[in-house]
Amino acid sequence: MKKCPKRVDLGRRQFLRGTGVAAAGVAAATVVPTGSAQAAGDRANYPSTRLANIKDLKANKPMDISYPDDDSPGVLIKLGSRVDGGAGPDGDVVAYSIMCPHKGYTLEYDASDKTLNCPGHYSRFDCEMEGQQVFGHSNQSLPMFSLRVDSKGDIHAEGVDELIYGRVANIRA
């Protein structure tokens, strides 16, 4: 039997050495410099911003807000029942960005099922489940604002848990 002149005899050691070098090269190429992106689960913290007072809210009626700045529309909602991530004495006050994480369309609140809905590509986000996407094209949950209610009933926003549409990081310059 005649050997092919282009055939390479590759032993186990050469194979392992070659794959190790290749893996190291891939790992080095994918390293992201520290601070260039917000890590999953990190909250970008902002100075405390007063949004409203508990007395200003009516159950299941959204209130328009802006947070963390005027270029970021949001909504403040008293859901009427305690939820994870809810603030206030009843644990039922939540706030979200109303810019769809998929394409930035303005979301609309549906009081019948307590969801925020996108008129563009029909993504739906559950306000009782910390903004979790329940349908649609988006690849992330809705940005939820961290809330604190003081002794006077004033509601303060103090952070964001997801990337707000159109931003590379939730960090103000």
Image: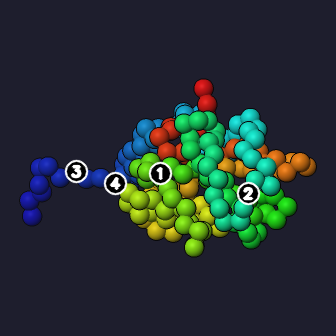
Residue that carries the numbered disc 1 in the rendered image: 106
Q: Secondary structure at mark 4?
A: loop
Badge 1 amino acid: Thr
Distance between mark 4 and mark 3 Cα atoms: 9 Å
Residue type, mark 2 in image: Leu
Nearer the observer, 90 or 61 = 61
Q: State the residue in front, 166 or 13.
A: 166
Amino acid found under the numbered disc labelled 3:
Val
Q: Residue furthest top?
A: 173
First along the sequence among labels 2 and 4: 4
Q: Residue at x 54, y 66 (%)?
A: 110
Q: Earlier in the sequence, mark 3 or mark 2?
A: 3
Secondary element type, mark 2: loop
Q: CA distance from mark 3 to mark 1?
A: 60 Å
CA distance separating discs 3 and 2: 75 Å
Distance, label 2 to label 4, CA atoms, is 73 Å
Q: Earlier in the sequence, mark 3 or mark 1?
A: 3
Q: Amino acid at mark 4?
A: Gly
